[in-house]
C-alpha cells in the first residue's frame, strides 16, 4: 500500500514538474514575443521619424528582456534622434565596454560626440566604426562611416585630414562601381584636388561612357584645369547625349579657345603667327567698337590735366604695335608673337572693364591668358 501511495505521489510530482516546465516555457516564450513585438514597433516608429514614441516602445521591450543588447542599441539611437545625448551616450558606452569592436556602436558614439561638440573624440569613434565589425554589407557600412567622417572634417575645415579619408575610400572603390567613383570625384573636388577628381570621373565613365552628367563634370574639371583639348572631348560627347544650352555654351567656348590659342602644343610657327595676327586684329576691332576707346581718340574730350586711363594706354600701345608688326614678322620672331599676345591680353582686360559684356571670343582670350600664366608662372 505504501509503495502504491509513493508511486502515485511520484507520478503526481512528475506531472506537476512537467506542467510547471510547460508553464515556464510558455511564459518565457510570451516574454520573448513581447520583446520582439515592442522592438519591431520601436524600429517602425523610429523609421517613421517618431523617436519619442520609439523610446517608449524600446523601453517596453527592455522591460521584458533587460539584457537584450540589440534593443539597448536601438534605444540609444532613439535617444540620439530625440536629442537626449547624455542618456544615449550612457547606453552606448555600456555596449562599447562589452564589444568595443562593433561598428554600429562606434558609429553611434561618433554621432553623439559630434552633436555634443567633441570633435576629436568623434574622429576616434568614426575610425572605430571604419575598422569595426558589421553584420550587414560591411564594405558599404565602412564607406558610409568614412563619408560621414569626411563631411565632418570638411565642415570644420580640417581639409588635409578630409583629403586623407577621401583618398582612403577612393583606393578601396571597385573600378566597376560607377556611382561610387562619381561620388569620389565630387568629394575630391570639395577637398581641393581637381586632378584626382578628374581621374575618378574618367574611371566612372569607363563603366558608362554615355552618362552625360559625368561627361559634363569631367569636361568642367578639365576646363578649369586648362586642359582644353580634353574638355572639348568630354563636352562634345556630352552634347551628343544631351542637346541643351547648358552643354552647347561651354562646348562653343572651349572650341573658341582651341581655335584661337597660339600657344597650343604642336602648332607650326606659321600657324602660331596666323593665330597671333588674327587675335591682334580682333583686339583692335574690340578697341574700335568700345565707346570709351573712341572717346579716347578725341583729344578735345579730355582735360589736359587728366591722366590717361588704362584703356587709353593700351589703345596707344596697340596702335604703335600695329605700325611695326605684320604676319610675316610674327612668323619669324617668337618674341614678337609673345609681345603681341601680351597686348591682346591687355586689350581684353581693359575693354572687359570699360566696354560692356564680353563675347565668347573675349572669354576665350581670358582663358588663353589664364592658361598661359599657369604654364609660365
Image (tube, grey):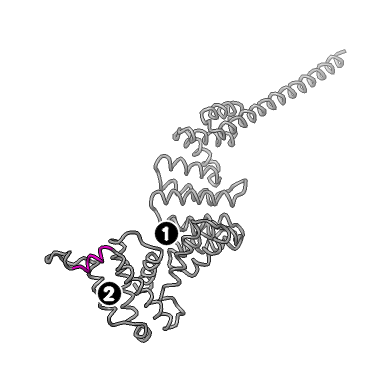
Numbered-mark total: 2
Q: Which of marks 1 and 2 is nearer the N terminus?
A: 1
Q: Relative to the observer, which residue lies in front, 348 or 10?
A: 348
Residue 140 position (above or below residue 289): above
Magenta portion: prevailing SS class:
helix
**179 relative to 287 in the view: left or right:** right
Q: Position of residue 274 (x, y in %)?
A: 40, 79
Residue 124 position (above or below residue 93): below
Does the image show residue 364?
yes
Does the residue at mark 1 contact the one at mark 2 (Cβ under 8 Å)? no
Residue 221 position (above or below residue 3): below
Q: Position of residue 306 (x, y in %)?
A: 14, 64
**323 relative to 102 in the view: left or right:** left
Q: What stretch is highlighted in magenta?
A: 291-298
Q: Where is residue 348 in the image (x, y as percent from the top left)?
A: 32, 67
Does the image show residue 335?
no
- The residue that label 2 is drawn on is 318
Query: Does the magenta portion include 254?
Result: no
The numbered dot on residue 192 is 1
Q: Relative to the observer, which residue lies in front, 365 or 191?
A: 365
Discs 1/2, front:
2
State the residue at coordinates (31%, 82%).
325
Q: Distance between the residues labelled 1 and 2?
A: 39 Å
**338 relative to 139 in the view: left or right:** left
State the residue at coordinates (50%, 62%).
218
Quadrant (top left/top right/bottom left/bottom right) for the N terminus:
top right
Q: What element carries label 1?
A: loop
Instruction: Residue at the far left: name it.
Output: 305
Q: What element carries label 2?
A: helix
Q: How crowded is mark 1: few (under 14 residues within 10 Å), some or many (20 or more)?
A: few
Amino acid at each position: 500500500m505504501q509503495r502504491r501511495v509513493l508511486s502515485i505521489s511520484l507520478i503526481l510530482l512528475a506531472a506537476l514538474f512537467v506542467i510547471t516546465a510547460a508553464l515556464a516555457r510558455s511564459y518565457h516564450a510570451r516574454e520573448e514575443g513581447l520583446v520582439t513585438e515592442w522592438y519591431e514597433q520601436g524600429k517602425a516608429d523610429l523609421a517613421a521619424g517618431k523617436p519619442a514614441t520609439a523610446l517608449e516602445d524600446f523601453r517596453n521591450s527592455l522591460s521584458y528582456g533587460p539584457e537584450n543588447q540589440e534593443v539597448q542599441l536601438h534605444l540609444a539611437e532613439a535617444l540620439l534622434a530625440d536629442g537626449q545625448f547624455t542618456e544615449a551616450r550612457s547606453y552606448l558606452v555600456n555596449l562599447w565596454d562589452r564589444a568595443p569592436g562593433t561598428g554600429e556602436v562606434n558609429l553611434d558614439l561618433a554621432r553623439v560626440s559630434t552633436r555634443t561638440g567633441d570633435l576629436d573624440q568623434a574622429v576616434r569613434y568614426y575610425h572605430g566604426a571604419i575598422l569595426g565589425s558589421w553584420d550587414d554589407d560591411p564594405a558599404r557600412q565602412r564607406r558610409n562611416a568614412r563619408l560621414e567622417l569626411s563631411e565632418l572634417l570638411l565642415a570644420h575645415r580640417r581639409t588635409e585630414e578630409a583629403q586623407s579619408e577621401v583618398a582612403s575610400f577612393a583606393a578601396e572603390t571597385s573600378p566597376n562601381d560607377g556611382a561610387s567613383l562619381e561620388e569620389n570625384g565630387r568629394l575630391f573636388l570639395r577637398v581641393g584636388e581637381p586632378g584626382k577628381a578628374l581621374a575618378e570621373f574618367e574611371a566612372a565613365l569607363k563603366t558608362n561612357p554615355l552618362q552625360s552628367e559625368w561627361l559634363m563634370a569631367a569636361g568642367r574639371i578639365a576646363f578649369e584645369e586648362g586642359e582644353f583639348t580634353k574638355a572639348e572631348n568630354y563636352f562634345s560627347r556630352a552634347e551628343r547625349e544631351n542637346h541643351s544650352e547648358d552643354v552647347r555654351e561651354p562646348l562653343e567656348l572651349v572650341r573658341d579657345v582651341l581655335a584661337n590659342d597660339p600657344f597650343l602644343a604642336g602648332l607650326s610657327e606659321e600657324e602660331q603667327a596666323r593665330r597671333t595676327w588674327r587675335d591682334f586684329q580682333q583686339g583692335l576691332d574690340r578697341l574700335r567698337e568700345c565707346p570709351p576707346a573712341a572717346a579716347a581718340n578725341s583729344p578735345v574730350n579730355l582735360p589736359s590735366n587728366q591722366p590717361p586711363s588704362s584703356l587709353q594706354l593700351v589703345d596707344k600701345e596697340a596702335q604703335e604695335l600695329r605700325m611695326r608688326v605684320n604676319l610675316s614678322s610674327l612668323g619669324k620672331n617668337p618674341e614678337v608673337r609673345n609681345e603681341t599676345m601680351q597686348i591682346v591680353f591687355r586689350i581684353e582686360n581693359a575693354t572687359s572693364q570699360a566696354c560692356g559684356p564680353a563675347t565668347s571670343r573675349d572669354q576665350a582670350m581670358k582663358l588663353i591668358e589664364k592658361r598661359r600664366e599657369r604654364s609660365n608662372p
